[in-house]
Every structure is written in structure tokens, then in C-alpha cells.
Image (cartoon, rainbow, N blue to C red):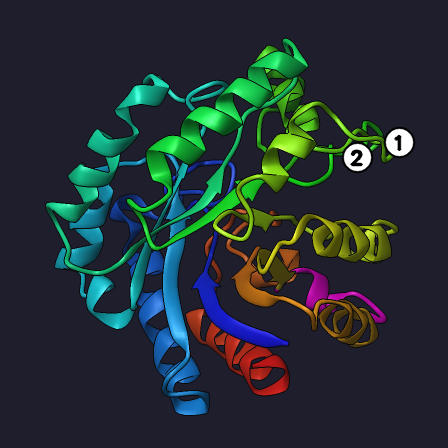
Amino acid sequence: MTVEAVMLWNEPNNLSHWDFGLDPDWKTYASMVKLASAEIRRERPRLTQVLGGISPIDAAFVQNMKQKGVVDAVDVIAVHGFPFDWNHWQVGEWPEKIGEVRAITDLPIWVSEVGASTFGSEEVQDLGLRRMAELLIGRVERIHWYSLHDLPRAWPATTRHREAEGSSYYRHFYMGLLREDGTPKRALETFRDYTPELGICQWLHFLDHRLDDTVAWLRRLGVKKLRTGLSWADSHRPGAAEWFDRQMKALEPFDVTLTFCFTPGAAGLRDDHTSPPKNVEEFGEFCARMTRRYC
């Protein structure tokens, strides 16, 4: 296994992943990322560091991070885009969205999540995959399709407002190339046409029963690049070290971008995974420990 990169948080400008009501102007987030970056550099100086993929794509947020010195601390800027499901722009605007970020920084840009749901129909996902592959391959340095599996309906989606979001919430459950029962959707064979240029972003939950199937399908599809995460919150659960070891061992066939995110309840200003931590050094220590163990 090669852990080719580590990503510092996920969608920090999205309220479902970072409570910026508790962190006006992202001052705590900026401090946390710079400290964590320094800790990771001490462990693995040449390991690629990625600013947590932003959603929505917001040039003003990137400019804010540049002014706060965060962009200088990382090696890559990552963006997420879902024009078929959640964003208020059309799929053909992808080049423009990438250009807005390139105007601010010379760092490489990765699309660390891009996808289309089958909420309306499988044909829409298939069309979305073809169109976004056409627009992004060759334009950015790394692309991770989101995702391989549908989210099981018995699990909650990682979002703050849940059912109050209406159809926006339920789209979370239909982003996979595989249905919950493991059967392929129409776009699965289309995806195979674009590997290894397209990688996969697949979040693996604590003790995820899909781990072995995930590995088998990724190998079958010819995927080389995988983005997943290790949760700081999960690291406080009993058995976390054993699960992390098992997960990372299973992912040895792939080049992994490893996302560090999600605040333990006891460590946050508020008991929620989106909360800024009371002590940013604790996140840095978690990142250093995971880097030392798996990178």
C-alpha cells in the first residue's frame, strides 16, 4: 500500500462537516490545519498534504485560506462537485469552476469527490459519469468518483438537517455504482471505461461490513487511486486501533488518499462531529499518530 496523500478535514466550508457558526471566519480551522500540517511534516516530510475538499467550490473560501497561511501549509487544493444533485450550477461549468480556483493558487487541484445519484434514474448517473469524465480527465491531476456503494438505508447520512432537507437528503443514499444489495447499476460498466484515470472515493464506516466487497470490486474495476478516511471521532471507540489496522491492511493494493476528520464529542466545543475542537493540538496529535502508523 502507498498512502500517497493525507487530506486535512472534509468539506470545511460545508455546515454538515464544520460548524462555522462556532468558528467565524474559519480562524480555528486555519489554526488546526496549519498545526496538523506541521505535525505531519515532522513525521513524513515528503508526504503530499491536501486541503480538505471544499463543497461548494468557493474561490472566496480559498482566498480566505490563502490569507490565513493555510494554502502555504499544503501541497494540493481539493474540490467537490455535484451539479446533477446539489450544486447550483450546470455540469458544463466544471472548467469555469476549476478556473476560479486556479486564479488564486498555483497548487495542483484535485477533484476528490464528484458524482451523480440514481435518485431520479440510472440513466442520469450514467450520463453524468460520461460527461464529467469528459470534462475533468486531463484538466485536473486527480479525480475520485463518489462513490462505489449506495449508503445503506438503515444508516444516517452525514449531514446536519437530515429529513428536513427533503430530496437533497435522500440523494445521499443513491450515489453508488452498486446498489445496497451489491448488484451493479448501469453506470458501473461505463466507469470501467475510465479507469485508472478515475479513482474512487468510498467512505468506510466503523466496522464496515462492506470492506472485503469494496476491495474486490475496486480490483475488478481496475481502480488504482482510492480516497477514504480515518475518523478522529472513531479513534475514541473501543477497538478502534484494531479496526483501523484491518481497514488499512485491506487497502494495500491501492494508492490511498487518507482523510483525517470528524471531532470526537468530548473534544468539541459542542458534542458533534462538526464542532471545532476545544484544543487544536489534539487533532494534530491524531494526524501525527495516524501518519506514523500508516504512511
Please state which of the two labelled residues, at mark 2 or mark 1, is closer to the viewer. Answer: 1
221 and 76: which one is in front? 221
Can you tell which quarter of the image residue 146 is in?
A: top right
Residue pictured at 42% horizontal, 30% vertical = 132
- Where does residue 161 sit, x and y in percent of width and height? 58, 25
From this viewpoint, is residue 163 visible? yes
Which quarter of the rendering shows the C terminus? bottom right
User: Range of the magenta residues?
Assistant: 232-239
Q: Around disc 1, counting alpha carbons within 10 Å, would you say few (fewer than 14), some (14 to 19), or many (20 or more)? A: few
Residue 234, magenta (yes or no): yes
Residue placed under numbered mark 1 in the picture: 181
Label disc, if present, on residue 240 of the rendered structure: none
Left or right: where does residue 176 sit relative to residue 145? right
Left or right: where does residue 189 sit relative to residue 33? right
Residue placed under numbered mark 2 in the picture: 155
Left or right: where does residue 175 sit relative to residue 9? right
